[in-house]
Image: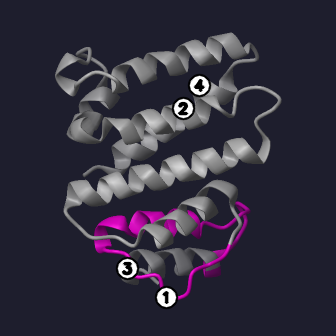
Amino acid sequence: MSWAALLTLDHRLSRAAAGDREPLLAQLKLAWWRDRMRSPASHWPQGEPLLAALAPFDLERAALEALVDAWEGLIGEEAGLVGMDRLADARAGVVVALARMAGCATDRAAVEILARRWTMRDGPQPKAVRLPRALRPLVILANLPRSSNAGPKALLRIVRLGLFGR
């Protein structure tokens, strides 16, 4: 299970979706990733470190493809909240896939709420969310401060969430 690979892919897809002024170029970049996710990891090109890191997701490629599709849905003027909802759903799906890979049971509703907070930076904070240790990065992502000058109190809260999960 690799949170680093997942977050790197998510970042790379966000850059592809937002990085070009020409939507067609962004769609071409995302189409490359979609094509990779549609074929087994054994058929992926060698030499791309991120693909190598994503190889353990081979049986969960559909969740990664949904993430690519969600980022593509944010290209253009009509993306709005519908696109953000799709992104939150796709992120939740990838986290559930990570849970399956780690062999841990998960509360799908809690994962969806936290993925929505991670994506939209708002939404309800579930009370006493108890996710397995392997999914704590999602708790941290959902609770990152909205501003870069949040201060030491916010940092201590993030450390507490990482250590104890709540």
Quick check: marks 3 and 4 in contact, CB under 8 Å? no
Check disc 1: other Cα within 10 Å, few if <14, some if 14-19, many if 20+.
few
Residue that mark 4 sits on? 16
Q: Sequence-wise, which precedes: disc 1 or disc 3?
A: 1
Q: Nearer the viewer, residue 161 or 38?
A: 38
State yes or no: residue 137 in magenta.
yes
C-alpha gap between disc 4 and disc 2: 12 Å
Q: Confirm whether residue 14 shows in the render.
A: no
Disc 2 secondary structure class:
helix
What amino acid type is highlighted by mark number 3?
Leu
Q: Residue at x 69, y 61 (%)?
A: 121
Q: Give the spatial CA distance, label 4 vs label 1.
A: 36 Å
Q: Earlier in the sequence, mark 3 or mark 2?
A: 2
Residue at image position (35%, 27%) is: 37
SS under mark 3 = helix
Camera-near label (2 vs 1) is: 2
Q: Disc 2 marks which residue? A: 69
